[in-house]
């Protein structure tokens, strides 16, 4: 399971202000629940929080337990049990653990995993919506392009500006989980795709029409390559940058969760 990058930012911000943190996670669920096992919420000693576990009532309960856990310096376990079994709602068990700035939150790394990382090739105006959608998903976004257009990438986490296209061959893509090619240039697409196919990236998506996708599959012998998706995105009738971004992120999320 990957962590949302907002949790990492919250942790770093709290550390900068020397605040203690209580971490609450879903330890067990039965039946249908809003949050699944392993989902996290952080509350610092200013009672600011990051993450959502359920209803407003539950959020307040977590904040109260966080306060008690930090004051008592001990873990607190509680359960949310539905009052009406016929409602279809399941039950959840939560554990709240205190972590303190004085020992730099020792042990918290056991619960907060690395962030899912998306690599986007291309930097035109069309990628702004995709960056925004990926940010909503809590993913880390990296934009790479020749003559990178920074005005469309302001919300991205990292920018890689290639001086020439061939420089792509010297880069290491070990830390990326998904990549999308949105350069809209056949020669550039081929160079990027060739480099990505040499990696272990589990999702490689290519923008284009069905005929172009068929040619690429034949050209690179990708008919049986399960991690290659072209045309990119789930078919939801998308035609605006926002809906296209939704279709792409939906497909990436489904692939990440083993639903494709």
Image (tube, helix red, strand yellow):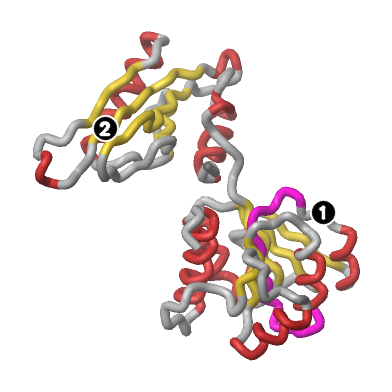
Q: Closer to us: mark 1 or mark 2?
A: 1
The residues tagged by marks 1 and 2 sit, at their Cα atoms, a distance apart of: 44 Å
Instruction: Look at the image and say whether residue 187 sits in the magenta stretch.
Output: yes
Q: Quadrant of residue 237?
A: bottom left
Q: Quadrant of residue 27?
A: top left
Label 1 vs 2, first from the N-terminus: 2
In the image, residue 9 lies at what x, y percent? Answer: 55, 40
Q: Which residues are magenta?
A: 174-188
* Mark 2 neighbour class, 10 Å CA radius: few under 14, some 14 to 19, many 20 or more: few
**Residue under the image location 40 percent in, 16 percent down:** 70
* 165 lies above or below 10: below
Q: Provide the secondary structure element on which disc 2 rests.
A: helix
* 211 lies above or below 38: below
Task: Out of 193 and 124, give the one closest to the viewer.
Answer: 193
Instruction: Look at the image and say whether residue 18 sits in the magenta stretch.
Output: no
Q: Give the mark count.
A: 2
**Residue under the image location 69 percent in, 55 percent down:** 158
Is any atom of residue 188 visible in this view?
yes
* Mark 1 neighbour class, 10 Å CA radius: few under 14, some 14 to 19, many 20 or more: few
**Residue under the image location 53 percent in, 59 percent down:** 255
In the image, residue 105 lies at what x, y percent? Answer: 56, 20
3 vs 154, left or right, is left
Instruction: Return the residue at label 1.
Output: 172
57 vs 111, left or right, is left
In the image, residue 150 lies at what x, y percent? Answer: 70, 67
Instruction: Return the residue at label 2.
Output: 60
Task: Out of 214 and 248, give the one closest to the viewer.
Answer: 214
* 183 lies above or below 82: below
144 vs 236, left or right, is right
* 205 lies above or below 71: below
């Amino acid at each position: 399971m990957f962590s949302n990058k907002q949790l990492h930012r919250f942790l770093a911000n709290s550390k900068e202000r020397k605040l203690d943190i209580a971490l609450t996670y879903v330890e067990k669920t039965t039946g249908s629940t809003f949050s699944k096992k392993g989902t996290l919420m952080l509350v610092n000693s200013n009672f600011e929080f990051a993450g959502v576990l359920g209803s407003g009532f539950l959020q307040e309960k977590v904040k109260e337990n966080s306060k008690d856990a930090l004051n008592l310096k001990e873990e607190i376990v509680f359960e949310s049990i539905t009052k009406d079994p016929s409602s279809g709602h399941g039950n959840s068990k939560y554990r709240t653990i205190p972590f303190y700035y004085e020992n730099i939150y020792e042990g918290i790394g056991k619960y907060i995993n690395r962030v899912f990382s998306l690599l986007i090739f291309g930097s035109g105006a069309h990628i702004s919506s995709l960056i925004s959608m990926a940010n909503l998903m809590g993913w880390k976004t990296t934009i790479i392009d020749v003559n990178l257009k920074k005005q469309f990438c302001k919300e991205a986490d990292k920018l890689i500006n290639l001086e020439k296209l061939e420089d792509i061959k010297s880069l290491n893509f070990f830390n990326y989980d998904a990549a999308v090619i949105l350069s809209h240039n056949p020669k550039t697409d081929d160079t990027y795709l060739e480099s990505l196919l040499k990696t272990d990236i589990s999702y490689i998506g290519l923008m284009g029409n069905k005929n172009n996708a068929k040619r690429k599959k034949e050209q690179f012998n990708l008919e049986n390559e399960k991690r290659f998706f072209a045309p990119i995105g789930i078919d939801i009738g998308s035609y605006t940058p926002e809906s296209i971004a939704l279709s792409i992120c939906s497909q990436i999320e489904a692939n990440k969760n083993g639903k494709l």
